[in-house]
Amino acid sequence: MTTDWRFGSAVFAALVFLSCSAAADPCDSPKDPAAAIVDCTQRINAGKSTGRNLAAYYNHRGDAYRQQGDNDRAVADYNEAIRLDPRNELALLGRGIAFSDKGDNDRAIADFSELIRLDPKFARGFLTRGMAFSDKGDTDRAIADFSEAIRLGPKDATVFVARGGSFSAKGEFERAIADYSEAIRINPRDVAAIKGRADAYRAKGDPDRAIADYSEVMPLDPKDAYTFVGRGHVFSYKGDFERAIADYTEAIRLNPKFALAYFSRGRSYLFAGSVEKALADLDQASTYAPKEAYVALWGDIVRRRSNLPSRLEQASSTIDMTVWPAPVVKLFMDQTTPETVLAAAENSDATRKKGRLCAANFYSAELSLMKGLKDEATRLFRLAASDCPYRFNERGEANAELKALGVVP
């Protein structure tokens, strides 16, 4: 199963400067948080300000701390600002974002809800609360809040991007594409919208449009390694491993420690016939992501094809063997059966179940192939090629394995 391995939720990234106003003094400067902290501290300690004015200085310093990633100090300053001025909406907003950055979504939601109570027409209150719901995995409430934010502020591309992400999370890719397209109409250079739409096209199984969108992002954000990995995935799905390798290589040039890029390039090298290069890349991916089960699995597949001893048992010591795909790892270590793996793939979440079944079928096929069970491998690869989600590399790789077996996918 292919994991995006992107940084954790970035939904609040666009709001870093949201609670900073445009005043010219250093205390209120979003461009130089260090200077803002010094200036705000001097004003607070001077003892010349009280009430709302003093609250504003605490709020601005909280913004500056938050920009520096010091969310604990930011929260402390926002607390003081709110104590001095309980209706300080910017402090509530900033504290909510800081709580979200800390992963405390319940407190974030409480702050954003209070913000909405104070100003029911403040679209950003609904946007930020929707983002916190999204981070909690409560996609339906997130969509409801994003929809209200859109009703209140229909010209804000950020909200359409956020709702598009939630629709994608639900597997509603047509609706996601519609939202991303509206964001692009509002702001044709919105990188998040174009990239999100590319991801949605890829997940929907529309590789050419996905490639077009990823390609459009590249000149707008040429240092984003993920975009090259995303386009590489689509080329891999199409069986164009040469172009996939080129994109993964560029991603590695941009980010030499990008485990996903090494992992993906290693798989493409394998299907392109370069087994030694595949093993080198998978070993590198393992160095940067030693706890990733799929990295260990692919390393084992390539080592076995190279007639090298398995290292899977050693690698499993760093993997969480209590969660999926531990059953697949155990299958490769001869500790369980394909039937048990299929049973373990069951899940009440239909999307998650589909992904697990994809992995169960694909990796059982790989193991059957290693054991010389061509007919069983063919049967399972066909299941993977037809049933795996389009965004999983296993779908395209199942087709590649079928072709190598001389079978029409």
Image (spheres, rainbow, N blue to C red):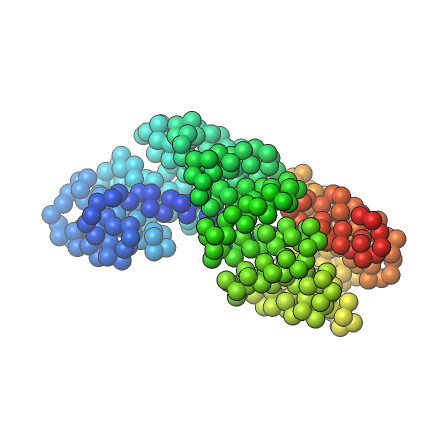
At x 83% / y 49%, what residue is drawn? 408
- Is residue 379 or residue 48 the one in the foreground? 379
At x 70% / y 71%, what residue is drawn? 276
Which residue is situated farthest in the bottom direction here? Answer: 308
Quadrant assignment, res 158: top left
At x 27% / y 55%, what residue is drawn? 32
**Image x and y of residue 177, in percent:** 55, 36
Horizontally, residue 165 falls left or right of residue 36, namely: right
* Residue 161 to residue 278: above or below: above
Horizontally, residue 276 falls left or right of residue 63, namely: right
At x 65% / y 52%, what residue is drawn? 235
**Image x and y of residue 132, in percent:** 45, 40
**Image x and y of residue 4, in percent:** 58, 52
- Is residue 27 or residue 401 the one in the foreground? 401
**Image x and y of residue 301, in percent:** 74, 63
Horizontally, residue 359 falls left or right of residue 150, namely: right
